[in-house]
Image (cartoon, rainbow, N blue to C red):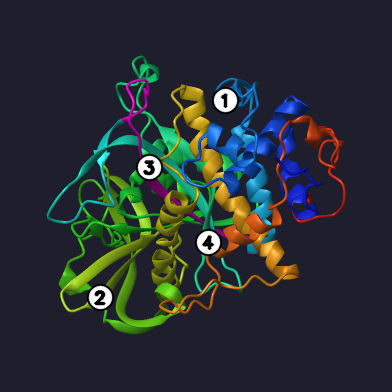
Amino acid sequence: MVPKMNHLPRIIIVFLLPFSILFRLKKSFLKMVLLFIGAVLCHGGRTVCGCLRALGMQGEKAFANYHHLLSRSKISMLQGSKELIKMILPLTGVSVVFVIDEHLERRRGNKIKAKATYRDPVASSKSRIIRATGLKWMVLAILVSFSWSKRSFALPICCVLRKPENHPKNLKRKTRSGTDLICQMLIVIRRWFPHLKITLLGDGDFARAKLCSLCQKLSIGLVSRMRADARLHDFVLPGKRKGRTPKVGKRLKKAEKSVWEKLQVQWYKGEFKEVLATARSCLWLAGRESAVITLKAVWVQLRPEDEVILMTTDIEMDVATVISLYVKRWNIEVTFREGRDYLGIETQREWSDLAIERSTPLLFMLYTLIVLIGNELNKTKAIVAESTAWYNKKHLTFSDLLQAVKKEMGEVKAPILNSLLNTELGKIDPGEELPGKCPTAMGF
């Protein structure tokens, strides 16, 4: 027997209402709310049928309409990214730190056109390369620090599928690389928030000439890692000379660096570590066309004969800040792992191209909403970290927030869609102005 559905908790309504503008039809939005609740309460694979089963809707004969919500309905995913950013900005302030990384979603199926074979970053090592078949996503997240956690959370706000060369859409056009996709994301975000101070973090794959040039044009500080053999040069010395004026000065060698300095930088798990570092502004000859880019290079020595080169397009950024920001980049890898473990990413079964392009971004959006809802719940009802005899956990993690949100939604189960129409959520039209002054309804 399915229990009767009570009204949705007010905090859930507050966080879901801004997304009503993504849908043209009111019933489509209500169906998505049901799938959202089902995805939170679901165990195992996050399929549409699994979400309906978690809601007690095993007898729903019109179950195909929920599949059509992902494969046919008109949904503005770009507008959803903008609403997510508006939710997160009150927690970060004027200065926002973005993190970009690639995520490999392991998928099989002859009908999936966007799948290809890529290097598996999780299973591979320096001595052995493991390849896996699946989908590659470019995920952009925002770093947010909370008082109840000792590490920052990387909250995904935008997710774009990178199509391979043999994809039908790429047969008559140039294939868009990961750098092209992230450049398009940054241009759109800068258009939305022209006065926002943005810092972008990425690994060595994003130390590209095109991305660096765009970040300088958009006033975005890029922090990334460089190759050990990067062509770094000094500035051209002033003075008269014969012939053509060179673009760069003398190439920097390892022996010509400044004196090493001991710094206390913020490391993993909120700890501090002492490292040797030195930095200087220089010119970088990057790309096949040897584009000249002005940047600040930071040499970091973790231990003898273990040296890495970091870079930033923001010349005024402090050396310790560059190192600590690059260390925080690892939080997006934690997001990927928690998404697979707790939200069932890689367990979807869609074959439609449109459904594939929506299911994974919606699950990443679900991760962000659970963290935001859990943060609000912790303000009113203190969430207790689940501890064991072998793991004395004192700080909250994503699993604790997920359990708190599940408990808040424990009684929210519906056998039919009409039960939602009588709730406070169903009485509000998608085009109406959002009621009340809440963090998600306020413009930023």
How packed mark 2 is, by other alpha carbons closer than 10 Å (few <14, some 14-19, many 20 or more), is some
Disc 1 crowd, CA 10 A, few/some/many (<14, 14-19, 20+)? some
What is the spatial separation of the Cα atoms under label 4 and label 2, in whole angstroms? 35 Å
- Which residue carries the number 4 mark? 399
Residue under numbered circle 2: 301
Q: Position of residue 223 (x, y in %)?
A: 41, 59
| Of marks 2 and 3, the one in the foreground | 2
Mark pair 1, 2: CA separation: 53 Å
Q: Which residue is mark 1?
A: 67
Question: How packed is label 3: few (under 14 Cα within 10 Å), some, or many (20 or more)?
Answer: some
Tell me the CA gap for discs 1 and 4. Answer: 28 Å
Earlier in the chain: of badge 3 and badge 4, it is: 3
Q: Earlier in the sequence, mark 1 or mark 4?
A: 1
Q: Earlier in the sequence, mark 1 or mark 2?
A: 1
Question: Residue shown at 43%/24% (left/top)?
Answer: 351
**Residue 390 horizontal/vertical position (percent):** 40, 78
Give the quarter of the figure containing the N terminus: top right
Q: Which residues are magenta?
A: 94-115
Q: Is residue 85 left or right of residue 241?
A: right
- Using the image, determine if residue 104 lies above or below residue 284: above
Whole-percent x, y for residue 71 in the image: 55, 23
Q: Position of residue 253 (x, y in %)?
A: 17, 66
Question: Which residue does the image show at 58% across and 43% down from the upper left?
Answer: 39
Give the alpha-carbon distance from disc 3 to disc 4, as whole Å.
38 Å
Which residue is label 3 attached to? 210
